[in-house]
Image: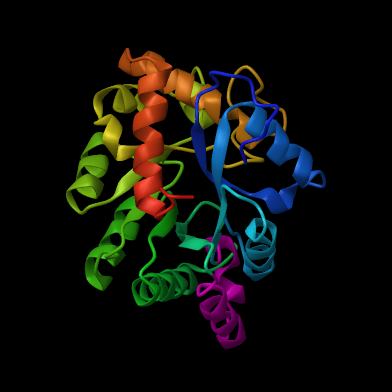
Amino acid sequence: METSNQAPGTRHLIDTHAHLDSYSDVEEVIERAAQAGVFKMIVAAFDLHCSRFNTKVVADKDGLFASIGVHPHNAKDLDSEAKDELSDLAKEPKVKAIGETGLDYHYLYSTKEVQKDAFKWHIELANKRGLPLIIHSREALDETLEIMEQEGFVKAGFVFHAFSGDMKQAEYIFEKGGLISVTGVVTFKNARDLQELIAEVDLGKIMLETDSPYLTPEPYRGKINEPANVKLVAEKVAALKDLSIDEVATTTTNTAENFFGIKKS
């Protein structure tokens, strides 16, 4: 994703969770991210269609990598044919993670039992392919962790994206070998609990993301989010931890490269 037009001295960041299928101007979004110093990106999946898109969009682009999977909202669509195709997509060389998957009890677009079954299948697939797991958990964090305890924690690692839990839950995730990732929510004025948590936890246990086109950080809240805005997340984390942006960029980039196995690309 690095371009010859990138300004000298821009910091190298990784957006570890962006949904590029949401944009009509994908190439422009990628270019704006590069100009902002975002040199690598994990393109996250919602469903089978999105997973297909992800593998295609990253195929010929340096610095772009895909995840494949079905969001808990869409768990009801994870039939045997979808499982077979996702299993095949997981073999693609630039697929570096399974997900996002997990539990979402806010809307219940898919029933709790269907979500649990889908989550367990994703855990199995991640272990089968030796890939890390990207986990979505909303209003169900303790139950999400219980299922992982029962099924066995993913050997290649796991990350709770857009983490919104408390310190006890974060420490348990770290104890089990997992990570958390931080979105633009950390910039919100009403996110004091999250800000206090991020200020306290080890920087090496954190990755940065936008969850684009959602969760737009301040001062652009209310507008469509883009991967370029991960720099605003990095700046807020730096401020909360009284570190330089360079320290945050270096550490979180190193963590993400190791987690997704993309260090040499």
**x 57%, y 42%: residue:** 211
Above or below residue 165? Residue 70 is below
In the picture provided, is 146 more to the left or to the right than 65? Answer: left
Residue plotted at (63% across, 49% down): 19
Quadrant location of residue 92? bottom right
Task: Measuring from the top left, give residue 133's x and y in whole percent.
Answer: 40, 60
Residue 136: image location, x then y, percent: 46, 53
Quarter of the picture containing the N terminus is: top right
| Magenta-colored span | 70-92
Residue 157 lies, in percent from the top left, at 31, 57
Q: Of residues 243 and 239, which is closer to you in this image?
A: 243
Q: Which residue is drawn at 23% across and 70% down?
A: 150
Please state the total of marks drawn on the protein image.
0
- Of all residues, the one furthest to the front in this rendering is 4
Q: Where is residue 246 in the image (x, y as percent from the top left)?
A: 40, 20
Observer able to see residue 1: yes
> Residue 205 in magenta?
no
Q: Nearer the viewer, residue 202 or 42?
A: 42
> In which image quadrant can residue 251 be found?
top left
Determine whether, in the image, residue 174 is placed left or right of residue 92.
Answer: left
Residue farthest along the left direction in this orientation: 175
Q: Nearer the viewer, residue 117 or 88?
A: 88
Residue 164 visible? no
- SS assignment for the magenta stretch, majority: helix
